[in-house]
Amino acid sequence: MAALARAASCQAEVTQWVAACSGLLQTATVQGQCRRMLHGIFQRCKTGQFQLPKACGGLIEANGAKTHQNRLIYSTSKQLSAKDSVQTSEEKVGPFTRIIEAMGFTGPLKYSRWKIKVAALRMYTCCVEKTDYEEFFNRCQMPDTLNSWFLVAQLHVWMCLVRMKQEGRAGKYMCRYIVHCMWEDVEQRGKVMGINSVVLKQDLRSMVENFYAALFGYDEGILSDDHVLAAALWRNLFNRNCEDPQHLELLVEYVRKQHLDALSGEDLLLTGEVSWRPLVESNARSILKPLSPVYNDEGL
């Protein structure tokens, strides 16, 4: 009786491995090797010496399966379904467009590139002209320098980039031009301020590195809780120099209340008009629905 019970248990184990390997192995050659391996396992089951081959165990672990106390936990199907759902939501493009963009060129977009560039310039202008930088400097105790201005500007540019990346290929193209406009503006402001060309070049190189590092930090913060966002603001906006936690709380609230997702993507692609809520609200509950911008056939 004990031998029959052990044989039945081993046969059940072999059945589980057959099911797992059948989902992992597709080619006929590999399937034949697996069958031979499983046949040897079954023969060893009869003698009571069952042990998982290392080759089959490596295949299972490579595809996301884990063994814990002789139980198989397999999560590949869930991961693939989540990945497939993300891919189906992406914008579909033809093979010719993929070839063009693989070569570094921009394929056909939803709107003309000229309209998108005009909208990108306007959106960057909103980041610069519709922001009260003096209020930021006073309330957050930041020095009135070009670098402080850039840190506040890049925060607003990042919020625009997050919104426009949701608009497919046209939105990503607009993001590239927004960043281009920002660096052109920073360079011109440095020249107007009389900064030496060598020093300005070094400062621009440092700003570029800090900008892309800040994008990663802000992205992590906006997808996480307020603690992570406050840490990202402390590192990037305050340059690790903020002793008053109320300043961080004020900036976290400022970022969270900018509901750019409420704006129409089509309007943003054609006009680029963005309005920012003030740093300090006179009435915290006065959140009004943003007005839809008006544009003509040329996108102006």
Image (cartoon, helix red, strand yellow):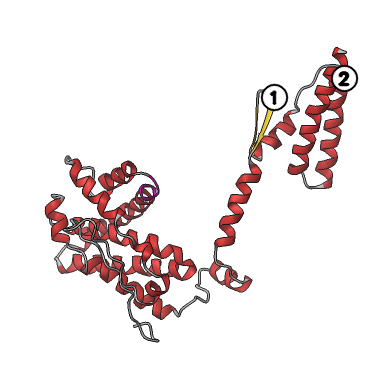
Q: Is residue 14 above or below residue 294?
A: above
Q: Quadrant of the N terminus?
A: top right
**View extreme (front): residue:** 285
Q: Provide residue 161's location: percent of width, then percent of height.
A: 37, 62
Give residue 84's quadrant in the image: bottom right
Q: Quick one: SS at disc 1?
A: loop
Q: Provide residue 155's location: percent of width, then percent of height.
A: 28, 57
Q: The residue under label 2 is which amino acid type?
A: Lys
How crowded pointer 1 is (Cα within 10 Å; few <14, some 14-19, many 20+) is rated as few
How crowded pointer 2 is (Cα within 10 Å; few <14, some 14-19, many 20+) is rated as some
Range of residues picked out in magenta: 220-224
Asked if residue 222 lies in the magenta stretch, the reply is yes
Q: Quadrant of the C terminus?
A: bottom left
- Side (left or right) of 56 relative to 300: right
Instruction: Name the disc covering residue 70, or none.
Output: 1
Instruction: List the residue tagged with mark 2.
Output: 46
Q: The residue under label 1 is which amino acid type?
A: Asn
Q: Quick one: SS at disc 2?
A: helix
Q: Is residue 191 above or below residue 111?
A: above
Viewer can see residue 206:
no
Main secondary structure type of the part rendered in magenta: helix
